[in-house]
Image: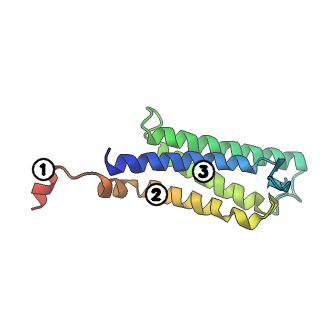
Amino acid sequence: MNLWKLFKVALVLAIVTHAFVHLAVVPGMNSEDGKALGWSGESWLLSGSLDDDTLWNLGLIMTALTIVFYLAATLGLLGVPGLKRTFVYMTATATAMSLLLFIVIWDGIEPDPNAAIFGPITTSVIMLVVLLRKRIEAALSPKTKVETSQKA
């Protein structure tokens, strides 16, 4: 297995893992020490404008869309027909949803919103890697004898 294929598998695993980390946003989870985890249902941006049920539904829809688009992007990265051509757009959509979700609910993340900063960092790194994938592939793919002899 060449390095590019290994890297692609690692990228798929990273995206899938990051997609499912968004499930931690779903409220009502408790840690081992009994502290609340997830989202409290509060939003610094929308709590005054939307009623609690609407805000709750919006948060769940954004979470679900983020997960669905990340999973579809990984299928495209793996070469599934119909998704292969659009995986960059799906990754960009998932990234936008993930970042928007963080912006909307960050202050309601329990137990400490500041601990969730790795989410947007991971999201941004995934998008950057996807955008640079052609260069990464060229750097990691083995050179054929024809390519090496043409450079000499």
Q: Residue at x 54, y 52 (%)?
A: 92
Type of residue at label 3? His
Residue 122 in the image: above or below residue 16? below
Say which mark, if any, is on residue 146: 1
The image position of residue 119, as x and y in percent, is 64, 59
Q: Earlier in the sequence, mark 2 or mark 1?
A: 2
The image position of residue 68, as x and y in percent, is 62, 40
Type of residue at label 2? Val
The secondary structure type at the circle numbered 2 is helix
The image position of residue 36, as x and y in percent, is 84, 54
* Foreground label between 3 and 2: 3
Dot 1: few (<14), some (14–19), or many (≥20) neighbours within 10 Å? Answer: few
Dot 3: few (<14), some (14–19), or many (≥20) neighbours within 10 Å? Answer: some
Say which mark, if any, is on residue 89: none
Q: Residue at x 14, y 56 (%)?
A: 148
| Residue identified by numbered label 2 | 129
Q: Compute the Cα span from label 1 to label 3.
A: 39 Å
| Residue identified by numbered label 3 | 18
Residue 55 in the image: above or below residue 112? above
